[in-house]
Image (cartoon, rainbow, N blue to C red):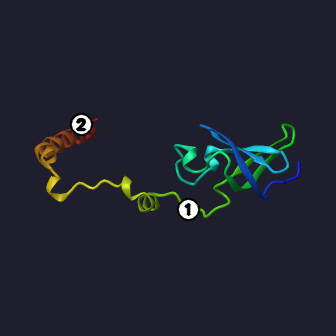
Amino acid sequence: MQYKQGDIVLGTVSGIQPYGAFIKLDNSEQGLIHISEISSYFVKNIEDYVKVGQKIKIKVLEVLEDKNLYRFSLKQVGTRYRQNVRNFKSINPKKRYKIPLDQQDFTPLEENLDRWIKEELKKIGEEKND
């Protein structure tokens, strides 16, 4: 096997399955990018990130010499983003939903608050008596 763990190589996407993308290297060797190594973000559809026939830079994660295969990573080659709510919201503004102030309604809270307080006080009283 020509490459070793940690090498950055250029490969061609030869197939896509729900669990990952198959990569063929110029020297006829091949491997797989598991779906978890496609992006730092949640990947629902791999085709949103790569297409069959596309050439991409990938990192060799593991060399499986007994099977003559490689394990690759796409997310470790590009810019790494921390996956958190703030970054997700700023990158995907369409996913944010805000309820306009005139549509916000606290009526259920107002109607139930006294009952909830009484129930909790009753539970606390029962716990103290036990």
Residue depicted at x 59% and y 53%: 39
Quick check: 34 left or right of 119? right
Residue type highlighted by circle 1:
Tyr
Judge from the rendering whether residue 66 lies leftward or rightward of residue 111; answer left or right. right
Say left or right for 109 vs 129. left
Q: Closest to the observer: 78 or 105? A: 78
Q: CA distance from mark 1 to mark 2?
A: 50 Å
Q: Position of residue 119 (x, y in %)?
A: 18, 39
Residue 62 is labelled as none
Q: Is residue 38 above or below residue 124?
A: below
Does residue 97 appear to the left or right of 119 in the view shown?
Answer: right
In percent of width and height, residue 65 lies at 86, 42
The residue tagged 1 is 81
Q: Secondary structure at mark 2?
A: helix
Disc 1 or 2, which lies upstream in sequence? 1
For residue 126, the mark is 2
Q: Position of residue 2 (x, y in %)?
A: 88, 52
Report the quarter where the C terminus lies. Answer: top left
Residue drawn at 73 percent across, 56 percent down: 59
Does dot 1 land on a helix, a strand or a loop? Answer: loop
Q: Quadrant of residue 14?
A: top right
At x 53% / y 53%, what residue is drawn? Answer: 41
Residue 30, x across and y down, in percent: 79, 44
Q: Residues within 10 Å of mark 2 (few under 14, many from 20)?
A: few
Name the residue type under label 2.
Answer: Glu
